[in-house]
Every structure is written in structure tokens, then in C-alpha cells.
Amino acid sequence: MAEQFLFADEPAANEDKDVINPFHILIVDDDEEIHVITKMALADFQLDQRPLAFHSAYSAAEAQAMLQQRDDFALMLLDVVMESDHAGLDVARWTREILKNKLIRIVLRTGQPGQAPEEEVIAKYDIDDYKEKTELTYRKLMTLMYSSLRAFRDLQAIENYKSGLERIIKASAEIFSAQSVTKLSQGILEQLVALLTRTQSAAYFKLSPNGFTASSEDNQPAHIIAATGEYKQRIGEVLQQSDGQRILEELRSRDESVTYYIDNDTYYGLYQTSQKQCYLLFIKGIGELSETDKHLLSLFMNNTAIAFEHAVMLQDNVAK
């Protein structure tokens, strides 16, 4: 059975809030008061319109278990002295050397600075900052959050870019097959999202020539060719008719072969071939785009659509 279309015309405000991907913050401290104070101070903090999601661990063992369960923590606020005088240092070293997590930002916090001198800790451990609890005022905590989360965001973008580049390199060896074009589109999309946006929620569709309805009778049903973030697991899925066709129908009515529309931080880009085949680029939480960014997105739509059409024509000729 076909799945529902991935977006609607005018989503409710509370639904938008639910789907925003937060920055996950791991607080590791054996003092419950530290957890409470930190969460209260940062309750309204946002970066790129993304809130914070807090997770608490009260020992080194709990922290390691949580770090193994999920790999998307952006920042760990880590106490040095817990069940031992060096428990926090052990967690920091384990995270980098054993877990091989290089993205998470690690900030050590200590109430006993003499136990772990700052210069020695910075030199020996791959941490990002070291703070005494008594000096970490509200203002300094805000500054710390901005600098740490921006660093995580940018490092994550670089990793996504590298992943996209790897897919492009692998796909280039068989560029004339439809399967390799799919891989190529996936790689380029990952690079574009990493370089141009602050989001990971993007999908690239091939749409039915007669509209947005996908059924078993359609020769070319709408389906996801490439995707990132929350849509990545849905690549290849068939889509039913959407309730949110207003913007898409408007794009289709335009004379341009490549056109786009931005509505509520969502990017809709449409490419129409001469045979009225359409390809749609959908990016949620796009943020502000420069003219160069918009041009690059249009190039992606134009060139990937042409590559798909050529691959299909080549396969048809071979079959004949």
C-alpha cells in the first residue's frame, strides 16, 4: 500500500514544533542540583530555531551506557569528580578513543579544580572546554552553548559532506545506469544539504506525469529517489496523493522548466522535462538562502533530472 505524502500545505504550529530536531545535551554529574540548575538556565535556549533536549547521567557508567545507546549527542557537560577523582576524565577518553565519537563536544566541569589542573587536562584529553563550576555564570553558560553547538553543527555538516562525496565517487564508475544516477543524486543531495542549509530534512522525488497520485495503475508513480535525515529510510517508497498540492500546482503552472517556492522555511523546487515528467526537491527548515545557494539547488534539479532521463533512454535503447 502506498504511503502518505510527506508534507502538507499549512501544517499546524504545534505539529511544526514536534518535528523540529533538537540538539541533544548529555549532563553527567553526581549532584542532582547541577542537573536542575543547568536545565532551568537553558530551558529557552535555541540555535537555528532548534531547542535543546536534555539527558541526565549520574555516574561514569551511566554516561557510557547512554553514549552507546545513541550517537547524536551534540554536547556533554561532564563532571570530573564522581565515583572516583578521575571518573569524568575516563569518560572523555573512552568517548574519543574507544567509542570513536569525534563529533560530540565535551566540556568538563569541576568543583574541585585542584584534582585536575586545567593545563594538564587540556593537553592530555581531547576535550573542547574546561570550566570551574563556580565561574560558570548564566552569561558564560550561554556563550559556552553557542560556541559548542555551532562547532558541533559545522563538524556534522562536514561529515555529511564527506558522506555525500563518497557516494558520488562510488557512483561515478557506472554513471550511465539508472541505479548509479540514484546513488549520484543521493550523494549530491547530502552535500547540498550539508553545505547550504541548517537542516537534514530533505527529499528528492520523481513525480507521476499526470499529477501527484500514485497507484498500482500508474506507469510512473511518485516515489523518493534520494533523501536525508528523517526521510532517508523512506527512499524508494511510493506516495499517495497529497492534501498539500497548492504550491506544487502553482509551480507546475509556471513556464520555467526549473522553478522554486519557499514557504514557512520549506523549499519546493520543481524541474519539468519536455515530456512533462517532474522532479521535486523538498527541503524542510531551509533557513535563509543566498542567490548562489538558490542557483546551486536549481542546478541540482536540472542536472540530476537530465541524468535520469538519459539513463532511462540508454536502457530502453539497449533493451531494443
Image (cartoon, rainbow, N blue to C red):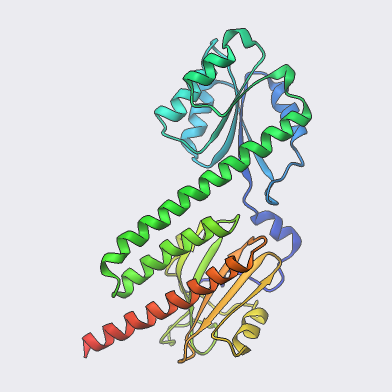
Q: Residue furthest top?
A: 114
268 relative to 161 in the view: left or right: right
161 relative to 251 in the view: left or right: left
Q: Quadrant of residue 185?
A: bottom left
Q: Position of residue 263 (x, y in %)?
A: 70, 70
Q: Position of residue 19 (x, y in %)?
A: 64, 56
* Residue appearing at x 53%, y 76% in the figure: 280
Residue 81 seen in the current view = no
Q: Could you tell me how many numbered marks the image carries?
A: 0
Q: Nearer the viewer, residue 217 or 16?
A: 16
Q: Position of residue 15 (x, y in %)?
A: 70, 60
Vertical placement of 268 versus 315: above or below?
A: above
Q: Quadrant of residue 142?
A: top right
Q: Quadrant of the C terminus?
A: bottom left
Q: Residue furthest front?
A: 292
* Residue appearing at x 49%, y 88% in the figure: 209
Q: Nearer the viewer, residue 108 or 223?
A: 108
* Residue appearing at x 53%, y 57% in the figure: 195
* Residue appearing at x 50%, y 73% in the figure: 299
Residue 236 seen in the current view = yes
Q: Position of residue 189 (x, y in %)?
A: 47, 64
